[in-house]
Image (spheres, grey):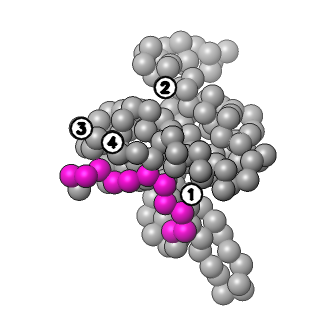
Amino acid sequence: MRRLLKFWSLTRREKQFFCEAAILLLLSNIGVRTIAFKHIDGFLRAHWSDGAESGFDRVDDIELVDLSLVRAVNLLPWKNLCLSRSIAAFIMLRRRGISAVMMAGVRSFDDSSLLAHAWVQTAGRMIGGGSENATFTPLVRIGQEPADR
């Protein structure tokens, strides 16, 4: 009941962002689990990686996208992988015309094991990680930085 009251106390814009985040997380989670990544990569490159405006003047939208994703991840009953969160963030940002780059990388360990991680960079900000992203070697880069950077 408390969660429902919290949802109704949000502004209309925050509700819209939250619903969009929840739907995109569901779709990206299903996609990551059922579709080969080369097809997901092709889809994102074909439909969402074209040029866009700078995100520096849209900081409020970027923060609301990040907040909405965090809210949706905490509320949804399934575990959302960093890849599905990154796909959802990337699409939400690109739908608003904000330049974003989705990165996927790996980090190797002494015992020859690998750890994979995905995150989104936009307007000097990282969604889906923080300073630990620098320890990953990027292998996939979808999208482009704003032209004025």
Tell whether 88 sits left or right of 130.
right
Mark 3 crowdedness (10 Å alpha carbons): few <14, some 14-19, many ≥20: few
- Choose mark 4 or mark 2, whichever is in front: 4
The kind of secondary structure element at disc 1 is strand
Q: Is residue 147 magenta?
A: yes
Q: Which mark is residue 52?
A: 4
Q: Quadrant of residue 107?
A: bottom right
The answer to whether residue 89 is seen in the rendering is no
- Sequence-wise, the earlier of marks 3 and 1 is 3
Residue furthest out toward the left: 148
Amino acid marked by disc 3:
Asp
Mark 1 crowdedness (10 Å alpha carbons): few <14, some 14-19, many ≥20: many
Q: Which residue is tagged 3?
A: 57
Q: Residue at x 74, y 40 (%)?
A: 30
Q: Residue at x 71, y 48 (%)?
A: 32
Q: Which mark is residue 17?
A: 2
Measured from the top left, where is residue 5 in percent x and y? 58, 14
Measure the C-alpha gap from mark 3 to mark 2.
18 Å
- Sequence-wise, the earlier of marks 1 and 4 is 4
Tell whether 20 sits left or right of 131.
right
Quadrant in which the C terminus appears? bottom left
